[in-house]
Amino acid sequence: MAVLVTGGAGYIGSHMVLALCDAGEEVVVLDSLVTGFDWAVDGRAQFVAGDAGDMALVGRLIAAHGIDAILHFAGSIVVPESVSDPLKYYANNTATSRNLIAAAVAGGVRHFIFSSTAAVYGMTGLEPVEEDAPLNPMSPYGRSKLMTEMMLADVAAAHPLRYGVLRYFNVAGADPGRRAGQSTPMATHLIKVGVQTALGQRAGMEIFGTDYPTPDGTCVRDYIHVSDLVAAHGLLLEHLRAGGESVTLNCGYGRGYSVREVLAGVEDVAGVALPVVEAPRRAGDPPSIVARADRVRELLGWRPAHADLKTIVRSAYEWERHLATRNR
Ligand code: UFG
């Protein structure tokens, strides 16, 4: 019995691989290395360079390793890019997932865990937002992920495959042991940009929008530590293997922080004042997205261990320092 992790050389996938290896699982990583790094894959896992949509390759891996579960992290994730190049997103997220799911069905894989996103909700006006809220994604990125959610539901109704969809809120931070972290050079995520600025790797940074209808005028997000997110996947895998039903779950803490609060946290951790400029709103940013996260706690018994903004920021900061020494 082994687990196939697509995108296991990427940010969240590499943390998942660590957790699975720590738990004694046999892990096969399939990653195209378009955005991931082979050095990010734990040495205990078997690494295969290739495309998650390559059905022949996936079929061979399933047969050779006795794969019983697929955790599908591979995909494209930059919202503005999905607006300018939607077909890339329908290829890398929707079409690739279709082929991967088809290979899973053909190979008799019973369990499938899919990385979805809070972007499937769009602007609901509901806060916190629960899993049954209306789904009106605002970007091709969100739609490309939602289509995969729909495919999984249809396929599970027709074949003996059960799935778990996890809708990630704002994932940040790094492995507390500094074994993995967010390594994308020019990532646009707030905490990454903040810690890089604090370390002098960027000359300055912008706050996109200070006139939102939120307490301090900046956008509010539900930031979740990557290690807690990964722990939810581990519990979900146990749930599916124990015969549990297919499920769709929000992954957040149910607590929002504004951009200003996050940057104050970065300043506190780094002990420097950030050179910040107030800039106009960034296109497509909803004012506030916070998860209703009761279901994941109730169903899986998930108890986050790092649910504190400072802890998240500190781990991201330490990883960034580590990465700078590594790349020197
Ligand atoms: N922000 C800044 N300055 C920066 C970077 C970000 O002010 O330099 C602001 C953004 O405008 C936004 C907030 O910080 O208001 C968070 O932005 P991120 O880019 O960190 O994250 P997003 O909320 O835009 O998106 C993330 C993921 C998506 C996912 C979404 C779900 O990147 O894939 O969370 O909530 F869909």
Image: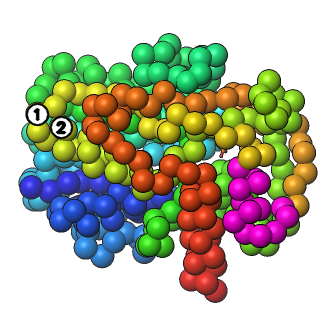
**Mark 2 residue element:** helix
Q: Amino acid at mark 2?
A: Leu
Is any atom of residue 163 visible in this view?
yes
- Left or right of 2: which side holds 275? right
Q: For residue 112, which quarter of the picture? A: top left
- Tell me, yes or no, whether the highlighted magenta stretch contains residue 106: no
Residue at (42% x, 16% y) in the render: 132
**Mark 1 residue element:** loop
- Left or right of 64: which side holds 215? right
Q: For ligand 1, give the image quadrant.
A: top right
Quarter of the image with the C terminus in it: bottom right
Numbered marks: total: 2
Percent position of residue 3, x then y: 20, 54
User: Which secondary structure type mostly characterizes the magenta part of the structure?
Assistant: helix
Judging by the rendered image, the residue that carries numbered circle 1 is 243
Question: Observer-nearest residue: 155 or 274?
Answer: 274
Percent position of residue 249, x then y: 37, 30
Is any atom of residue 144 visible in this view?
no
Question: Observer-nearest residue: 290 or 136?
Answer: 290
Residue at (57% x, 70% y) in the render: 319
Determine contact: label 1, label 2, CB under 8 Å: yes
Question: Observer-nearest residue: 277 or 295?
Answer: 295
Residue at (48% x, 73% y) in the render: 178
Percent position of residue 198, x then y: 77, 67
Judging by the rendered image, the residue that carries numbered circle 2 is 240
Q: Amino acid at mark 1?
A: Gly
Residue extent of the magenta highlight: 262-274
Q: Sort mark 1 into few (<14), some (14-19) or many (20+) by Cα contacts within 10 Å.
A: few
